[in-house]
């Protein structure tokens, strides 16, 4: 297939998508990763400016593509990658808001699982609620890579919210009280999509701001400065996914 049923992904002539795809929310971050980390990157998609590239990292083929913001956008692209383009693994590389005192701006968080308020959960008709969980082999590899790089990565559960501005002003405190490390907008959906598609997923995050201290990175810093997260994800891709 060269074009997805939704026409959101349309492969350019002579291009293809690797078995493992890194997915930042921002398509410009996808371009940054391709330009700075991949050898001979080739643009395979630019529909709606959701840029996607395939290239080599450490001699192995990896793709990177934007996912947009929120569970619906991310899962549209990931469902199509998994089910129409032969992708086997997805690694989210994105930003998150820290909520624990032990988590600081620029820290790396590797999401073992994700709680969520998203209505996406109810669509699977499972009595009770599914538990969105990372692929263990990918998680284990990412933790090992972080240790090799000398990066202290916080590993634990995060909170995926459909709201950037939640009407319940206490929601972040409630998530903090449950021991969740950070708040973001895609991980639970990505994990559920991978589980439903019988594929694999991992979410690696950089803390861009702290909900309770007010410390924050600006937009350019968020786009360009998450080098540790990007390198952990790329090394995980070539060791555990391709």
Image (spheres, rainbow, N blue to C red):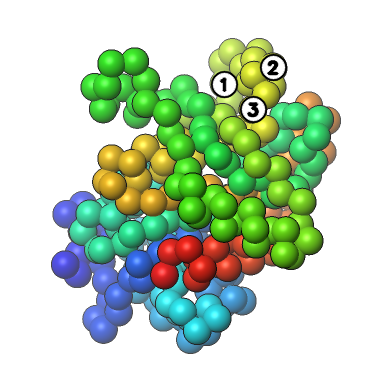
SS at circle 2: helix
Of pointers 1 and 2, the one earlier in the residue sequence: 1
Find residue 58 and report its horizontal and vertical position in percent.
55, 81
Find residue 230 and report its horizontal and vertical position in percent.
62, 63
Find residue 2 and report its horizontal and vertical position in percent.
19, 69
Total residue callouts:
3
Find residue 143 and report its horizontal and vertical position in percent.
64, 53
User: Is residue 133 shown above or below 128?
Assistant: below
Q: Which residue does the image show at 43% across and 33% down from the upper left? A: 132
User: Is residue 25 shown above or below 10?
Assistant: above
Residue 68 in view:
no
Q: Quadrant of the N terminus?
A: bottom left
Q: Which residue is mark 1?
A: 166
Q: Which residue is mark 2?
A: 177
User: Is residue 53 shown above or below 241?
Assistant: below
Q: Are marks 1 and 2 in contact (CB under 8 Å)?
A: no
User: Is residue 112 shown above or below 106?
Assistant: above
- At label 2, counting other C-alpha atoms closer than 10 Å, the crowd grade (few under 14, some 14-19, many 20 or more) is few
- At label 3, counting other C-alpha atoms closer than 10 Å, the crowd grade (few under 14, some 14-19, many 20 or more) is many
Q: CA distance from mark 3 to mark 1?
A: 17 Å
Q: Which mark is residue 180?
A: 3
Name the image quarter holding residue 159: top right
Q: Are marks 2 and 3 in contact (CB under 8 Å)?
A: no
Q: Which residue does the image show at 77% across and 51% down from the upper left? A: 152
Q: CA distance from mark 2 to mark 3?
A: 8 Å
Q: Nearer the viewer, mark 1 or mark 2?
A: 2
């Amino acid at each position: 297939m060269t074009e997805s049923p939704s026409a959101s992904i349309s492969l350019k002539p002579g291009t293809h998508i690797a078995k493992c795809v890194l997915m930042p929310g921002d398509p410009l971050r996808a371009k940054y990763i391709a330009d700075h980390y991949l050898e001979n990157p080739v643009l395979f998609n630019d529909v709606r400016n959701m840029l996607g590239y395939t290239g080599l990292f450490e001699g192995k083929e990896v793709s990177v593509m934007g996912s947009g913001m929120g569970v619906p956008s991310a899962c549209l692209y990931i469902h199509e990658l998994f089910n129409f383009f032969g992708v086997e693994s997805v690694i989210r590389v994105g930003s998150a808001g820290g909520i624990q005192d032990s988590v600081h701006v620029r820290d790396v968080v590797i999401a073992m699982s994700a709680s969520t308020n998203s209505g996406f959960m109810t669509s699977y008709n499972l009595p009770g609620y599914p538990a969105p969980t990372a692929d263990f082999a990918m998680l284990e590899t990412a933790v090992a890579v972080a240790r090799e790089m000398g990066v202290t990565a916080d590993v634990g559960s995060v909170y995926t919210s459909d709201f950037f501005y939640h009407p319940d002003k206490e929601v972040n405190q409630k998530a903090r009280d449950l021991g969740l490390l950070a708040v973001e907008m895609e991980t639970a959906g990505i994990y559920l999509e991978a589980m439903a598609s019988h594929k694999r997923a991992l979410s690696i995050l950089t803390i861009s701001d702290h909900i309770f201290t007010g410390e924050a990175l600006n937009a350019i810093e968020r786009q360009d400065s998450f080098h540790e997260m990007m390198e952990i994800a790329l090394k995980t891709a070539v060791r555990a996914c391709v």
